[in-house]
Image (cartoon, grey):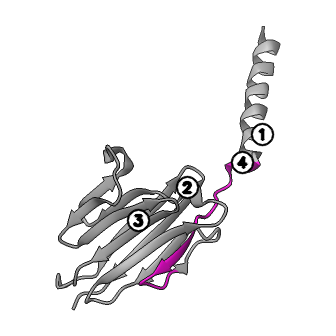
Amino acid sequence: MRTFFKFLCIFALVVGLSSCENEDEEFENIDFKVTGIELHDVSVNNHTHVGTLLAEGGTITFEAKGKNKDSGFVSEVSCGSYRWDRSQLQDIQYPQTICNEDWGQVTITSVLPHTTKVVITPNATGSTREIRVIFGGGYKTSIVYIRQPSM
């Protein structure tokens, strides 16, 4: 009985560790044609990007392209205490504004290709504003941080 129990433990350990080697579980970036801001990659696998917008605000457009363009949908938006995620999306009609706050507005303009417009208002708060937009989900994800200094 002890031998069988040892065998089960070793078998579970081997199976558990071997699943970590699955090449399908690697993070992949979503590429975008971006207008209105210059983004810089800040992670090793290029799935995290940062850009700085002028204090006066502006309009940024993200259009998914490349092999993972089908995963270019917006899955989360956050700024300060505000947070929106895809589970709040109902009865999609395009264009659809998914977020309309004091700091700005996020609108999904199309799905073929996935295109998202972010309009950011002037920042007169006295502190730097950071807006985070996550595109995709699972292992096909891109995270964008938009930083905006105060006037």
Whole-angstrom CA distance, mark 3 to mark 4, is 24 Å
In the picture of the structure, the residue carrying the numbered disc 1 is: 18
Q: Residue at x 77, y 39 (%)?
A: 18
Disc number lying in front (2 or 1): 2
For mark 2, give the secondary structure. helix
Residue 122 x, y percent position in the rendering: 22, 84
Q: Amino acid at mark 3?
A: Val
Mark nearer the N terminus (2 vs 4): 4
Horizontal side, residue 78 vs residue 25: left or right: left
Q: Which residues are magenta?
A: 23-39
Which residue type does callout 1 highlight? Ser
Looking at the rendered image, the quarter that the N terminus falls into is top right
**Residue 54 occupies which quadrant of the picture?**
bottom left
Task: Using the rendered view, name the quadrant where residue 26 is placed.
Answer: bottom right
Q: Is residue 139 magenta?
A: no
Identify the residue position indicated by label 3 in the image.
133
Q: Residue furthest top?
A: 1
Task: Give how far across and how far down residue 150 sits, in percent.
Answer: 24, 87
